Amino acid sequence: MNVNSIVVLKLVLLICWPWLVYSKGEQGRLLVNMTLVRNASALGAYCLDGSLPAYHLHRGFGAGANNWLLQFEGGGWCNDIKSCLDRSKTHRGSTRYMNKLEVFAGILSNNASFNPDFYNWNRVKIRYCDGASFAGDAKFFNGTSLLYFKGQRIWQAILLDLLPKGLGHAKKALLSGCSAGGLATFLHCDNFTSYLPKNASVKCLSDAGFFLDERDIALNHTMRSFYEDLVSLQGVEPNLNQNCTSTLYYPHLFHHILVPPSSDPRRHWDHCRFNVTACNAYQLNILQGFRKNMLAALRVFYQDSRRDGMYINSCFTHCQSETQDTWFAVDSPRIHNKTIAQTVGDWYYSRNVSKEIDCAYPCDTTCHNMI
């Protein structure tokens, strides 16, 4: 990607700076109103059910007034008509069902004690309602049911709505997201850069959005088939980087890559899937093998790139940049005594080389294992 830097966060944690002594209970909740993109219909940009797309914007101030952080919301995918119809009747496929107020915490916090590097930036949460990581461009209608697969247009409509609000004059910018939103960050990083001033510092952060094309425990490529169906159904392929489509697929985490329901009909993995401490020795060995494969896939990136960053911990949790406990708190997870927040800040501002890799589970006692 032709951007200043990209950080890969597969399993992430954070530490606090030396002066951080607060706990999450001391932070007042910041609730931010939803903004519907009224002009989205002119671009044909609709959620699955035809509702207008939306985002939440909290304005920056002081030294951060001209800096922008855009955060893609995550939330899985849908790859067939039934699952997308079901999704269209929930907050994952329609702004009609979304909370109109959203809590901004973690990387979106406006409190310097909880988000020291980005607290005073303009911070945007982009709501997710298309089911394909903001990448589809198709429509389904069979005479009775209508579905809009317009994620790519949603992304463009939101950008065009934000540019005149100050994004078009950004001095610094960070595009981020988690899970399906982390994948969207990879997909749209180059495009995001093209909308901003040439002298802007633009970087992209993917939290839990780097996925491997791995076989499941039954040695099947279950998730490869899932994503092939998704790409075909939602018209995603024209919007993918053609250098990547032959080598990289986009499966979803331990639960869906290694142990999808079809691979474990007798449910031997049920306890392990939801409580890592309940995994037996055989199951832990499988998980460690997955970790090794991921690190091997990132080896060239780790060894040869000096400007990029990564923070890979061994915690069984998800979307750590969005949660205050794991982003920046007194008991946040750490690698080499560094939190995610400190590592991301060091990387963005080029204060230090930011490549942290944790020891293998279960050695990290700072983890918040929340899956």
Image (spheres, rainbow, N blue to C red):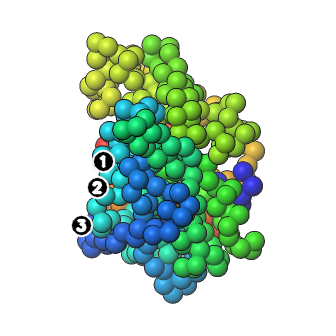
Out of 196 and 84, give the one closest to the viewer: 84
Q: Pointers 3 and 1 in contact (CB under 8 A)?
A: no
Out of 330 and 286, give the one closest to the viewer: 286
Which residue type does callout 3 highlight? Gly
Instruction: Report, in whole angstroms, how far the alpha carbon at label 3 lies from the one at label 1.
Output: 30 Å
Which residue type does callout 1 highlight? Thr
Residue 351 appears left or right of 315: right
Up/down of 285 relative to 205, above or below? above
Instruction: Report, in whole angstroms, how far the alpha carbon at label 3 lies from the one at label 2.
Output: 29 Å
Say whether residue 106 is visible.
yes
Q: Pointers 2 and 1 in contact (CB under 8 A)?
A: yes
Residue 221 in percent (x, y) is at 52, 20
Chain-order first, disc 3 or disc 1: 3
Secondary structure of the residue carrying numbered label 3? helix
State the quadrant of the C terminus: top left
Out of 314 and 161, give the one closest to the viewer: 161
Up/down of 300 relative to 193, above or below? above
Crowdedness near tag 3: few (<14), some (14–19) or many (≥20) residues, C-alpha within 10 Å: few
Residue position marked by numbered label 2 in the rendering: 97
Secondary structure of the residue carrying numbered label 1? loop
Instruction: Report, in whole angstroms, how far the alpha carbon at label 2 lies from the one at label 1.
Output: 6 Å
Crowdedness near tag 1: few (<14), some (14–19) or many (≥20) residues, C-alpha within 10 Å: some
Secondary structure of the residue carrying numbered label 2? helix
Which residue type does callout 2 highlight? Tyr
Report the number of numbered marks: 3
Residue position marked by numbered label 1 in the rendering: 90
At x 43% / y 35%, what residue is drawn? Answer: 142
Chain-order first, disc 2 or disc 1: 1
Q: Quadrant of residue 115?
A: bottom left
Residue 244 in percent (x, y) is at 69, 37
